[in-house]
Image (cartoon, grey):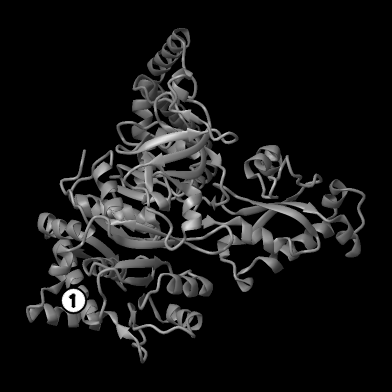
Amino acid sequence: MPSKLKPRTLPELYRLAAETYAGLAAFATRTADGEFESVSFAELYDRGLALAAALRELGVQAGDRVALFADNRIEWITADYAVQLCGAADVPRGSDVTEAEIRYITQHAETQVVFIEDAKLLEKFRRATAEQSFRHVILMDRRGGVPSGVLGFQELLERGRELRAQGDRSVEETMAAIRPDDIFTIIYTSGTTGTPKGVPLSHANMCSQIRCLPFTLHPGERALSILPVWHSYERVFEMVTIAYGATTYYTSLRTIGEDLRNVKPTVMASAPRLWESLHHRILDKMESAPPPRRALFRAAYAVARNVQRARLFFGGQDLQLTPRSRTEWLAAWVGHAMSLVVSLIPFLVLDGLVLRKLREVVGGHFRGTISGGGALPPHVDEFFNYIGIPVLEGYGLTETSPVLAVRTWDYLVIGTVGRIFKETEVRIYDLQTGEILYPDRSRKGRGRGLKGEIVVKGPQVMSGYYKDPARTAEVLHDGWFRTGDIGMVTFNDCIKIIGRCKDTIVLLNGENVEPVPIENRLCESPLISQCMVTGQDQKFLGVLIVPNLDAFRAAGIRAANVAELESLPEVAELVNAELKRLVSTETGFKAFERIVSWRLISKAFEVGDELTSTFKLKRHVISEKYAEILKSP
């Protein structure tokens, strides 16, 4: 169902939300005493107008780029409103931004006005930009005072209110001139060489996400926000909550358990890691429970699984990777019908006794979560959907604003990321030949079930990387965007993600990692001849290492082969020390980029096998070849 609000630009969305939902709470954030303090849609819009007026007085013009370095907080969304109401574009990044990234982003985007979260980040910013000059730096959190040469957020907001009280309506004039194709944000993502890529997104890109959303929210719904707001996924989710009049509560990993109980959210955007952690906690708790309680849980889950599988089958929502013959369909029908007959009554009893209590972990009013930023482990995906906590997995990239496909409450095919968004076209390209596998009328099922690279075209696709025509040409052709992801269209018209043919690794917590800079650093070690960083949809990074036996011998460790080398305890100590020395926060890497596990392999990577003709790693080939090693503990 489409939103009641049908904006053409985001400033129009903010205005319509203020008029339509006026006194409803828009956002809520924790105060110092732990209570939530909310701001209404009307008040948030007024704050945005006031701050925009002050920014205009500071010289911010339509088309300017304004950096926004901060994490989730009410000042973030207020600044976001203000920048866009000025007709400018924000350039956001979280507080974990490195000094190198600050320097590159501010120079590349040519930002002259910068919002900074707090004093700690301000110090990092000043170190990174010591040789740069900015018109204005604005500090959001004024605890400890506002240093010389820096403007205070609250003082700037008050100045804007004064201007508005004096009759300044220049912001409204600017808003009227904003066009759908104007850029509202530039989000910088890491590049394979370590140089970030600027992804400019237009108002039309984001408004298409609201327009094409295949499910609806309701005014007054409670959404819990835990993902970084500067990420495109959390960004679009917050735009959707604004469009539908829902309230967004900012939470954190530290307080999420308490906030789930107190806020009793109905929906939330999330990353797979959250659900994997919750799944582990539930199972650990059950394993330590008395035997009768443990047996009751296992019985409840078994009958719930049978009932849910039958429900999905009869609703045409079971995973269909291959076409079914009439005989196969009839056999499946009979099997699920018998399973339903046997399990339904026990399910109705045990659901109330056992599973309902599990659902109370997420507050008791939970309609479901939209999970993105990485693939859900299949067993976790099944577990929560079977016990009655709907997980609507979605798929997209920053370059596509970001959502391309998502499961819905009405069409939830476990093992897929749902149907492609309306107004969006999808193709599957052969990984070797580039031939279009889907859609192809000459093939059985039009090419469904055939895996290849996912290529898309639609209103959410970016126009191209900011000031980077070379990298734009690599991924955009006649409006078609090459995602770099391997997938297929199932026989019930959903997208199934199989792997990645591009380098970026997405961890379970949603963090994107570019492996090439890490691999380049690791290969500086004399002990490592070649390596490939792994970790897609895992908690942490690992690495496959082709060791240099001569270097190990030079270090006093003699082994005839890799198997013997790996068995020596001193080798583990040496390799761990080398990995820690090369990849750490001290050497410029982020905490989630550290290498936690490693495996030695005996065969060197070769051109025509594991390497391309230009000596680039064929990651999917290596991952398949060493799948068993990667799975081993």
Q: Is residue 376 visible?
A: yes
> In screen coordinates, is 128 left or right of 14?
right
Q: Is residue 273 visible?
A: no
The residue located at (24%, 67%) in the rendering is 87
Quadrant including the C terminus: top right
Task: Give neighbour class at mark 1: few <14, some 14-19, many 20+ (Cα, 10 Å).
Answer: many
- Element marked by disc 1: helix
> Residue 146: percent from the left, percent from the top?
34, 87
The residue located at (38%, 66%) in the rendering is 92
The single residue placed furthest to the top in the displayed view is: 327
> In screen coordinates, is 219 left or right of 443?
left
> Residue 487: percent from the left, percent from the top?
50, 35
- Seen in the picture, residue 457 relative to 615 is either above or below; the reply is above
Residue that mark 1 sits on: 53
Front residue of 432/566: it is: 432
Front residue of 81/565: it is: 81
Front residue of 154/168: it is: 168
- Seen in the picture, residue 505 relative to 213 is either above or below; the reply is below
- Seen in the picture, residue 169 relative to 617 is either above or below; the reply is below
The residue located at (45%, 27%) in the rendering is 490
Q: Amino acid at mark 1?
A: Ala
> In screen coordinates, is 311 left or right of 561?
left
Quadrant including the N terminus: top left
Front residue of 602/559: it is: 602
The residue located at (24%, 83%) in the rendering is 155
In the picture, residue 576 is in which quadrant? bottom right
